[in-house]
Image (spheres, rainbow, N blue to C red):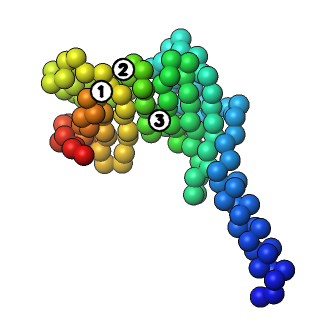
Amino acid sequence: MNTKNIFTLILVVSSFFATAQEKQKNVKLPEEATTFLAEHFKGIQIQEVKKINREISFKYEVLLENGFEIDFSDRGRWEQLESHTMSLPTTMLQTSVSQYILKNYSNAKVTEVKKGNRFNFVEINDETMLQFDTEGNFYKILVD
């Protein structure tokens, strides 16, 4: 390869990575995400929406006015919720998960929820991470 081709290749590759990191503001959320927000965060205004490119798809990052952060897949399915200020609602979780937390950690604030393919993870304010299967059955406590 000559120097011109190498330079062109470097330019193309670097522009690809720059695009992958691009955050787009003021994007429209998919209907499923909009419905989720209306159902579980009624009356809380959206402060910012970013569309973030991933390797083969993208995700939406939503910041609400109360400080809640919610990640949605490209189709609008929620993947992760996080709050540094107040307890997250648990209405999007199975009833058994909410009941388990209330029974075993009655004063706890839910600070993060991650939805996975096989397991869901709920972090409470003392940094305890609880793992549940996708059916809502308690699986184990994760320790750092």
Label 1 with label 2: CB-CB less than 8 Å: yes
Q: Would residue 6 appear left or right of 98 to someone viewing this image?
A: right
Residue name at image x 22 percent, y 25 percent:
101
Residue name at image x 81 percent, y 87 percent:
2
Instruction: State the mark number for residue 78.
Output: 3
Circle nearer the viewer, 3 or 1: 1
**x%, y% of residue 63?**
56, 27
**What's under tag 3, amino acid-wise?**
Trp
Quadrant for the N terminus in the image: bottom right
Residue name at image x 31 percent, y 40 percent:
120
Is residue 133 depicted above or below 56 in this figure?
A: above
- C-alpha gap between disc 3 and disc 1: 21 Å
**What's under tag 2, amino acid-wise?**
Ser
Q: Would residue 39 appear left or right of 17 to someone viewing this image?
A: left
Which residue bears the numbered disc 2? Answer: 87
Q: Earlier in the sequence, mark 1 or mark 2?
A: 2
**x%, y% of residue 37?**
51, 23
Q: Residues within 10 Å of mark 1 (few under 14, many from 20)?
A: some
Which residue reaches farthest top?
43
Q: Residues within 10 Å of mark 2 (few under 14, many from 20)?
A: some
- C-alpha gap between disc 1 and disc 2: 8 Å
Residue 139 shows in this picture: no
Q: Earlier in the sequence, mark 3 or mark 1?
A: 3
- The secondary element bearing badge 1 is classed as loop
- The secondary element bearing badge 3 is classed as strand
Q: Would residue 40 appear left or right of 62 to someone viewing this image?
A: left
Which residue bears the numbered disc 1? Answer: 125
- C-alpha gap between disc 2 and disc 3: 17 Å
